[in-house]
Image (tube, rainbow, N blue to C red):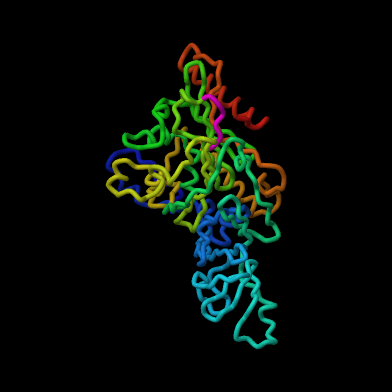
Amino acid sequence: MAKRAPFLRSGFNAYHHRGLPPEDEELTRVGPGTPCGEYLRRFWQPVVLASELTDVPRRLRILGEDLVAYRDKSGAIGLLELYCPHRGTSLEFALIEQSGIRCCYHGWLFGCNGAILETPGEPADSTLKDRLFHGAYPVHEHNGLVFAYMGPPEKRPAFPIFDTYDLPGYRMAARAPTLWECNWLQVKENSMDPAHLQFLHTLPGSEGFTDDFKEHPEWDWLETPVGMVYIDTRRNGDKVWVRVADFILPNIHQFPPNADPMALRNSINRPQATTWAVPLDDAHTMQIGYYRAPEGKDMRRGTGFGQDGNRSYGERQRIPGDYDAQVSIHGGMARHGLEHLTTTDRGIIMMRNMIRAGIRAAKKGDGFDHPTLHNGAAIATYSHDQMVAGFPPAASADADRALIRKVARDTVKAAVRHGLSG
């Protein structure tokens, strides 16, 4: 099978375009032992809302693995392989006890680290429970989310703290997860695609973006110590509106608020959301993370317009949103050999190259590194928007585009060097 479909140069020629190029398995496959799956497992991933751990276990599927999460009666959280090691009964039907979870079938009791605490029915002198462990993953609860580390135990990093977790003057809350019926990569690529803002989010009837987004912007992309940003820049009289969204390797994005018009923007606004695209398997992705809002302003509630498939099919056809655009890409699994990338896709190309480099570094072992894998102070991120004053329009349209692009680049470079303050 060819890696790229033919470049059609005449009409009515679909007959020569029927072959389906292979998927990019290095970037899309996430199960155990796959290059991308092993890369993603090297980072802490949010897997469930803390509030979803009630008096019954919670069945999960994360990175192609079937798991069960629970909070025992002492308050400890466990994340175990789904099937009991005795006879294979699903632990989603287990009983939650003071110090673990008990299989409903024969009563084996498991601790949060996978230790087998009791094996009822075995002889009193049996040593099986002292020799055998059930598969378990370490977890960390933070501000309403439960994170898991599913990589090599000896390489487990400290839990990372981003600078946006504790912003002065802001409140933060966990956001309910949404299911996207497609591969994780096309969900995450949207975060470095500012071009869609000007069209998809300004369609008649769509919600959530101001009319300012209809104005033609300048787009740019820059690397940062944690990944990359897109810069969406617009002219506003003698000011330049610089809007910056983060992509944080391997699967996080942050974006600034979008509901206030330019006229009301007079300070640095930090991101309204921090979102992970967590692969459940190759064809399903969970978006989960945090919302935030300045003190005195309402916290965003719900998923937002077009961020799930809950509207009727007819409505989604007439007023599509992010969910519809992304899930529909090649039926849920992008085929890069069918794409025709343009200048507006520079961020997509840059992101794929970054992820591919990380995958290969993790596979090689030597030299694999990232700021989120270290202990230390809060990890700096760069998503924000601000009005930069003192730059009246240049003499020509081309010169002004060059000017505002330079202002935007200088603004982001200063943020990388010195950090952000509001």
- Residue 276 point in image, percent of width and height: 53, 48
Q: Looking at the figure, which quarter contains the C terminus?
A: top right
Q: Is residue 273 above or below residue 41?
A: above
Q: Name the residue nearer the viewer: 103 or 96.
A: 96
Residue at screen point 52% across, 80% down: 105
Residue at screen point 27% across, 42% down: 12
Which region of the structure is painted magenta?
Answer: 266-271
- Residue 90 point in image, percent of width and height: 50, 72
Q: Is residue 231 magenta?
A: no
On the picture, is 35 further left or further right than 196?
A: right
On the picture, is 198 further left or further right than 67?
A: left
Instruction: Determine the residue located farthest toward the right in the rendered image.
Output: 376
Asked which quadrant contains residue 376, the reply is: top right
Q: Is residue 239 above or below residue 168?
A: above
- Residue 167 point in image, percent of width and height: 61, 38
Q: Is residue 391 above or below residue 130?
A: above
Residue at screen point 56% across, 62% down: 32
